[in-house]
Amino acid sequence: MDDERTAGFEALYTANFSSILGYVVRRCENPEDAADVVAETFAVAWRRSDAVPAGEEARLWLYGVARKVLANHRRGLAGRRGLTEALAADVAELYTPSAEDSAETGTLGAVFRRLPEDDRELLSLVAWEGLDHSELAGVLGCSRNAVRIRLHRARKRLASALVKAGVAADWPALSGRTR
Amino acid sequence: MNESLEARVSGLARVRDEDLAGWPHSEGARTLLAGLLADPPSRRVPRARRLILVAAAVVAVTAGAVAVPGMLGTGTVPAASYTGSAIDIVREGDFLVARIKDPLADSGRYAEAFRALGKDVDIELVPVSPKLVGRVLQASLGGAGQASTDLVPTGAGPVDCVAQPGSCTLVVRISADTTGPVRYLLGRAARPGESYQDGRGGN
């Protein structure tokens, strides 16, 4: 039974590692924190492997865990540094600024970072993780209707902030996916 | 100019999942996985503990009937916890949990700690081969209740205590309502050059 559990966890880890690493790297300011958050997220999944849903749902479940771990991390998480040093060293390469970082991206980035955290997370889950409304509802633990309203407001706030910053965008394109 | 807001936010991402395809097999990812798997969740449940159930129910009833009024009669209230350089004891639920901080300390120091909590517990540690570290070699529990021992990592990181007993702490749990004398002979990690006394308990 333990072998089964181990094999199940290895499969979960391999299938979802890139998604979770991506999710965390996109939100963590440095590679050490990112490696710690990834480690803690999978440690939670290992401890609670009975609670992890099967298939594609597992990724959403892990996003939910990673989100909570990140929130805790900001309040100081006692890392698993012994386990994560190698990962942090690998992850560091993802933090090298790329030549593509243009001035426009810089302004957009600054505007985006000034948005309320909830707006930022919602827009990120759509733009970065590609989640649709029902997936968002699952990860955030709210109804699809609430997601729809919150997303609409977040987009409006980002749009008007961009106008103020002089990098206005073409709003009609902001429909997002609604499946 | 037809770029959607979503696409622009997407351009802010530090990395895209597609670029991370080979990462589950990177050295860092494998090290982390191995570390997590080395710390199986099942070790944390009591099932894995080496429980010693006290079988002598008749003795328990007799000892309890005598000892409880006796303790009340002294008028002294035992301390709730004990902290010393050799051992810490705290009450956790229905158990007294003793962490042996110095396995080389004189066994009188452990007894003294338990005495401060109103318990008659003697723990003696003898050097044993690694696979027997933390094991009970001999036990005699004179009262009601149960006791167990466990070997847990001393630091925060996961450690395989069977492979590295020196990095782990011996924890002894004894029912808080134990009334009679408890005598324990336990295995501890041997110092370099020290000979094992595995045979001593006949276990």
Image: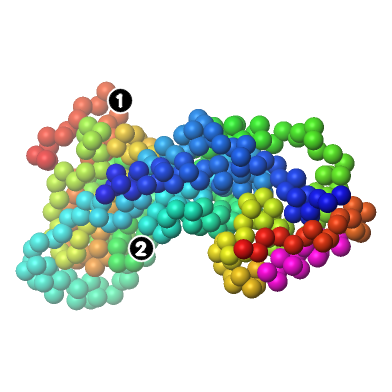
Give B184 or A47, whichever is nearer the viewer.
A47
Residue segment shown in magenta: A148-161
Q: Identify the secondary structure beneath mark 1.
A: loop
Where is residue B14? Give x, y as percent: 70, 42
Where is residue A104? Give x, y as percent: 86, 44
Placement of A147 over or under B193, stated as above or below: below
Q: Which mark is residue A144?
A: none
Name the residue furthest top: B193
- The chief SS type of the magenta part is helix
The image quarter containing residue A71 is bottom right
Q: Identify the secondary structure beneath mark 2.
A: strand
Count how many numbered circles sit on residues in the image: 2
Where is residue A49? Give x, y as percent: 40, 54
Identity of the residue drawn at 21% across and 38% down: B132
Identity of the residue drawn at 87% across and 41% down: A103
| Residue receiving disc 1 | B192
The image quarter containing residue B60 is bottom left
Amino acid type, label 1: Pro
Report whether residue B192 is seen.
yes
Identity of the residue drawn at 27% across and 23% down: B193
> Which dot, 2 or 1, sits closer to the camera?
2
Q: Residues within 10 Å of mark 1 (few under 14, many from 20)?
A: few
Location of the C terminus of chain B (image quadrant): top left
Amino acid type, label 2: Glu
| Residue receiving disc 2 | B92
Report whether residue A62 is seen.
no
